[in-house]
Amino acid sequence: MSASSGAPLQTPGDRRRSGRFIAFGIAIVLVVGALGFRMYDLQVLQAGRYTTLARAQRMATEPIRVQRGLIYDRRGRKLVENIPSFTVRLRPADLPYTQRERVAARLAELLDLSAEGIIQTLDRSRSSKYDPIRIAIDVPTDTARLIAEEHASLPGVWVELDSRRNYLFGPLVSHVLGWTGRISGEEFGRLKDDGYLPDDTIGKAGLELTFEEELRGRYGLQEVQRDGSGRVVRALRTIREPQEGRSLVLTIDLQVQKEAERALKWAMNVVGLRRGVFIVMDPQTGEVLAMVSLPSYDNNLFARGISTTDFRRLVNDRDRPLINLAISEQEPPGSTYKLITGTGALQDRRITAQQKLLTKPFLQIGRWKYWEWNKEGWGPCDMNCGFGHSSDTYFYQVAGRLGIDRLGYWAQEFGFGRRTGIDLPGEVPGIIPTNTWARRLFGRDIYAGEVYQAGIGQGFNMVTALQLINAYAALANGGTLYRPQLVRRVVDESGRVVRDFEPDVIRELSVDPEVLRTMRVAARNVLVIRHTYNLVDLPIVVAGKSGTAEFGIRDSKGRLPFHSWFVGFTPSSPRKDSWDPYGFEAVKETDAELVFLAFAFDSRTRGNAATEIVKYFLQLHYDLKVDLRETWILQRDNFYGQ
């Protein structure tokens, strides 16, 4: 080809560059096409799917919390209420890990907590990272407002208006009511399928625990919409309707509870007693009208979120204020137990009511002497005399005739050796010795001297205050042993009765009514012969039995410390009448209106401290306008004059 043709010549290098441009252009077209198709796929073909996913990320299911039921006394006086309270919660999923320490430090500063404690709370949670964790309760209003204002710098944290328990009378009824607290990991693992939440509040003691299901109600469930920070913007729909907690109406009479506490506190202050119990019951129904255990504690400490210092103080207190001594402490019953020995022997016809046994300074088995408490004896005594003077040598002989196994049988018939079944947690069964029991523990039968000791409520015998008063209630009402109860009814938020508790009979005692009548008269004789000093001078008829129960280690003079008991009852018309000057006819009836018990732990007083406590209670309860308390009885000394 000639140069004059004008067409440029194409070299091999030019052809290679042209191929690259074409390939690059094709690649651009393919990439742009793929991106366009993907955009079309996302925005058009799958728009509905991703809209649904986006909406799901903004929506969640949340519980609808309900108010816990209230608690009232038998006359409708409120004992427990719910009051508004701010709670700070945190959802771990909404808190970036890199910000945990900063957020924890700020919350610690605002809430007066430790940052380490907050981190530990997060780390120890056994729930999902999407479940909220409670950081603090009962937060002051100003602090709650400040946290809410700082929500942008506190991811995952929010303040919620909640409620907490307020126990209106604190220590007065804390052992009955109990308290609520944060659910534990173990409890949550067991109850999460029942609708409990990881940061829930649950009954921990007393009736709050026993009636947790009724008081709690049932949480509802709703679908909510959240904003970008995870806070709820609005509720969308209700998935499950909530059910408010039921309320309890108790058998407790607040006024009687106050009278019982006042009488017990008075003697404890005079003597310097460390522990005491006072119980009042209706013997015709088994209803508990008052149950006082001292020392007590303020259950509001737990409701507000108890501090470590306060908790350690309560737990380490040697007098165990957290323990309900009326049901969870077992002690020797002393001479109050002679009711069982006497009733059993009469019913088994090992003696008669009029049969006289010679009481002496002591009885002897081998080299062992078993002393009369006054070291003298009372001469020939029948049941009225033996029970009235609380003669030990009389009841040694009666127990010997009855035998340990029959004595154990009658004790169990009256409810000893088994839990009463009261609607409170923590009840202990006590100990009633028999040959079978001794063989199991010691590989031998009960010795003869141990039978003597059992007959006067010493030795191996251990009972609770509730068991003892329940046995005397059965004596007072003519032989019906009831299960003691603290709740009369369960009602809903409108006051409608959901569940009514009728008197619950454990058993009718297999005892002849005449035998029980004999023992009621003998119980009145305890006062008439002034074994309880001037208690008989009250203008009302009272029958009962005192008891001095030795325990522990002998002192340098060989003396044992002792507790004091008194358990008794009043007839339905307790005022004295001229036609029945000694009150024997009144107590023959089975219509007793009150049965009461006082227990003074480690009393070591000149007289029976429990008798003085009961005397003061009766003066208060019946408004007797007399004061027969004898403080010399409460002086620290030795009851036996040793």
Image (cartoon, rainbow, N blue to C red):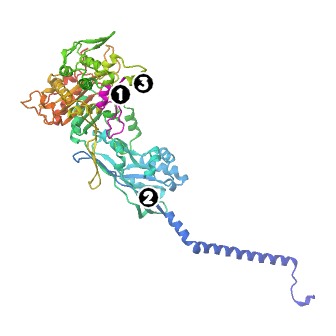
Q: 10 Å neighbourhood of mark 2: few (<14), some, or many (≥20)? A: some
- Mark 1 — residue? 431
Please tell me which of labels 2 and 3 falls first in the chain: 2
Q: Residue furthest right?
A: 2
**Residue at the image point whose x is 61% and y is 73% from the top:** 41
Give the quadrant of the C terminus: top left
**Residue at the image point whose x is 51% and y is 63% from the top:** 57
Residue 491 at x, y percent in the picture? 28, 51
Q: Amino acid at mark 2?
A: Glu
- Mark 3 — residue? 440
Q: Is residue 91 left or right of residue 472?
A: right
Q: Is residue 624 left or right of residue 149?
A: left
**Residue at the image point whose x is 21% and y is 29% from the top:** 516
Residue 436 seen in the current view: yes
Checking the image for residue 28, the label placed there is: none
Task: Depth check: give the residue in front, 336 or 196.
Answer: 336
Disc 1 and disc 2: Cα gap in Å?
Answer: 51 Å
Give the residues drawn in magenta, as a range.
407-434
Q: Is residue 159 left or right of residue 499?
A: right
Please tell me which of labels 3 and 1 falls first in the chain: 1
Nearer to us of marks 3 and 1 is 3
Q: Amino acid at mark 3?
A: Arg
Checking the image for residue 62, the label placed there is: 2
Residue 600 at x, y percent in the picture? 27, 27
Report which quarter residue 588 is drawn in.
Answer: top left
Q: 10 Å neighbourhood of mark 3: few (<14), some, or many (≥20)? A: few
Q: 10 Å neighbourhood of mark 1: few (<14), some, or many (≥20)? A: some
